[in-house]
Image: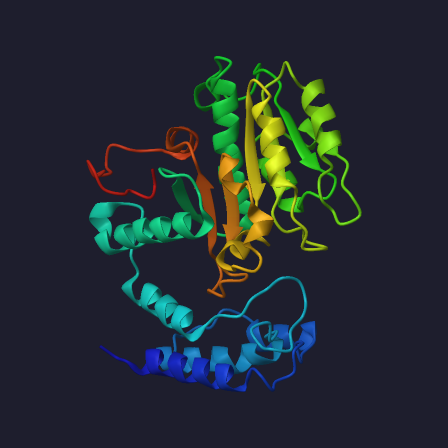
Amino acid sequence: MDRSALEAAYMAAVRYLENVPARRVGARADVASMRAELGGPLPERGEPAARVVEQLARSADPGIVASAGPRFFGFVIGGSLPAAVGADWLTSAWDQNAGLFVLSPAAAIVEDTVLEWLTDLFGLPPGTGIGFVTGGQMANTTCLAAARHSVLARVGWDAAAKGLIGAPAVAVILGDEAHVTVYGALRLLGLGDASAIRVACDSEGRMVPDALRDALRAAKDRPAILCSQAGNVNTGSFDPLPRIVQLVREHDNAWLHVDGAFGLWAAASPRYKHHLAGLDGADSWATDAHKWLNVPYDNGLAFVRDRNAHRAAMARTAAYLQPSSNERDNYQ
């Protein structure tokens, strides 16, 4: 095997990581110069792989934002710890199709282990399932797909078979400061922005329980999905989960989802985990690992208490696939 391209990538990565604490945080090049470096006509002839990697590292460098460095304070973007970068390199080198156990037993067991560790860390109910997705958007979408399936199934409607045309209306209740990815999920799931019933928040962006109570009462005859927050994007505040859980459980047919992209990892801190009291009373939870956990992009996590609802909403199969009889097949 020709190792030159891999060695070139390793050296370029190490140089970048060694210099990232001191380099300029913002990009150093404008759009025109980046297009000149990275664009142009399709080459007529191929080049040695190592040369391609080296040229990519040189040409892209002026357009790299040092978001992994210690002086970056934009958005909520973590860096990547060396152990996580190393594991990511191995993942790319192994090049596994992790959808089936038979194609990668190692990937399946790692995913089971991650589920076991994180449900313990977050204090989630035994039997909770997990989906590994690309980020907070798809984590929220996956959880809300399970929610949609579950609340409609309870009123006799099979969303997987019938879709939403003619389905009973679902009330989606969320705070005034719900994250944009929740609205994105509603669009992707065919529920739409108009299904959202917005509940007032206090000055810190926390859902007001009395306003939530009124919204649930107004939706008492409809299937309902409530989206709460653990970590407001603007303030870091947490919705009052114990009271929210109590109110949701008084509704005949409601699902409680927690968007924890920004705050679910507070459960790992003895100092801050009190903010997540009542978390185990929800039905689904979403978070990212590339924020506070500092693993490379993309890495989202969707947790669903009801594994059957999760599978019913997201599973698919085909005759050519070889499912496992008793081990994890991530595509299911």
- Is residue 105 at all visible to an observer of this figure? yes
Front position in the image: 284 or 98: 284
Percent from the top left, x then y, of residue 205?
74, 47
Front position in the image: 67 or 203: 203
Q: Quadrant of residue 75?
A: bottom right
Rendered residue at 37%/72% (across/down): 86
Rendered residue at 55%/56% (across/down): 266
Front position in the image: 61 or 330: 330
Percent from the top left, x then y, of residue 251?
60, 21
Q: Quadrant of residue 193?
A: top right
143 versus 103 height, above or below: above
What's the coloring here? rainbow
Percent from the top left, x then y, of residue 298?
48, 58
Split into 4 quadrants, where in the image is the C terminus?
A: top left
327 on left or right of 165: left
Q: How many marks?
A: 0
Percent from the top left, x then y, of residue 165?
57, 18
- Is residue 48 at all visible to an observer of this figure? no
261 on left or right of 324: right
Split into 4 quadrants, where in the image is the N terminus?
A: bottom left
Rendered residue at 70%/30% (across/down): 212
Rendered residue at 34%/82% (across/down): 7
